[in-house]
Amino acid sequence: MRHIMSPLDFTTEELDKLFDLANDIENNPRKYAHACDGKILATCFYEPSTRTRLSFESAMTRLGGQVIGFSDANSSSASKGESVADTIRVISCYADICAMRHPKEGAPIVAAEHSRIPVINAGDGGHQHPTQTLTDLLTIRSMKHKLNNFTIGLCGDLKFGRTVHSLIDALVRYDSIRFIFISPEELRVPDYITEMLKEKNIPYEEVIRLENVMPELDVLYMTRVQRERFFNEEDYIRLKDFYILDTDKLALAKEDMLILHPLPRVNEIAVEVDNDPRAAYFNQAQYGVYVRMALILTLLGITVE
Ligand code: NCD
């Protein structure tokens, strides 16, 4: 039995297979419409989310399966003091696979250790968010037709953004990737990440101004300032509108640069940018469903001829 806690739980070859499957689902959705008939996905969300939870629900439903679950800790027995270990033991009796989001880093790992069904980490605190990373990689691979040899700018809250941490971890395994980290001083990428890049000899730069590096980027990954992980509201208010991508700034970018954002967007991308052909964040949300469908099939060991 297999779980996914981090994108590194799959080799790059396994990821290629997963992405091929996701693209096949994209092109032949009817072929997969009953692949999960009789199967149940449990979504255990101890932290608010709309798109990740709904994209899992949509993925399972599109495969013909059913979904049960809870969408905030207060409506689960966690509010009565139940441990994650006990919860997953019980969920193992009710469902065939579980997607879990938790504000505590490592909680899904504890769940996986006590589970009889595959557990998918759907985001744990500021730590990892592997299915968002699979979504990001599939989007880049499908729209740029490669996962190597490009410069990616990650912009915004690089300190608390778990999607950023997961994506960097995953991208270092591909050839000739150069990272440009664009953030205010207070929201710089954590030291453990820059240490890891130094150790692996992977080129990166840290800058404050987006405009200065825009012409170099092949992919721009915008992120929201993670309000819920701030210690005080004042800092959040000071930093929340630090970056706003608008058409003026975009004029400096390459014609074929890809703009990604895990969503939800707040102010960091002006709505006027949505009509630009480089804006790929809504395509990304669509790829998020295909890749979760592919992941559910893979973890359940279901193949469709
Ligand atoms: C992200 C998350 O939950 O970390 N959202 C998502 O999964 N689509 C990014 C965010 O909340 O900013």
Image (cartoon, rainbow, N blue to C red):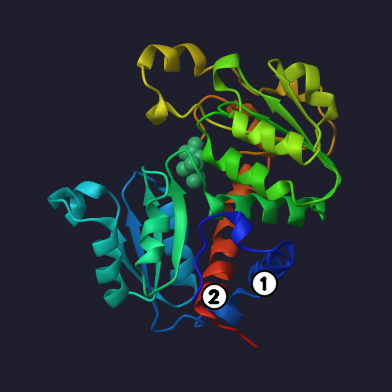
Residue 136 can be seen in this image: yes
Q: Is mark 1 within 8 Å of ligand 1?
A: no
Q: The C terminus is located in which quarter?
A: bottom right
Q: Is residue 61 left or right of residue 254?
A: left
Residue under the point 36% across and 61% down? 111
Give the answer, above or below, for where 59 lies relative to 107: below
Res. 22 image quadrant: bottom right
Residue under circle 1? Answer: 21
Residue under the point 61% across and 34% down? 192
Q: Residues at badges 1 and 2 in contact (C-beta under 8 Å)?
A: yes
Between discs 1 and 2, the one toward the N terminus: 1
Crowding at dot 1, Cα within 10 Å, few <14 / some 14-19 / many 20+, comes out as: many
Q: Amino acid at mark 2?
A: Leu
Residue situated in front as seen by the camera: 186 or 280: 186
Find the residue positioned furthest to the bottom.
305
**Can you give x and y, in whole percent of width and height, for residue 13 in the image?**
74, 67
**Can you give x and y, in whole percent of width and height, for residue 230 in the image?**
40, 24
Residue situated in front as seen by the camera: 203 or 96: 203
Residue under circle 2? Answer: 297
Q: CA distance from mark 1 to mark 2?
A: 9 Å
**Can you give x and y, in whole percent of width and height, for residue 116 in the image?**
37, 75
Crowding at dot 2, Cα within 10 Å, few <14 / some 14-19 / many 20+, comes out as: many
Residue under the point 50% across and 78% down? 300
Residue situated in front as seen by the camera: 227 or 83: 83
Q: Is residue 291 left or right of residue 200?
A: left
Find the residue positioned furthest to the left.
80
Tell me, for residue 254, which label it has, or none.
none
**Can you give x and y, in whole percent of width and height, for residue 222 in the image?**
62, 32
Label 1 secondary element: helix
Q: How many marks?
A: 2
Residue under the point 60% across and 74% down? 29
Q: Amino acid at mark 1?
A: Leu
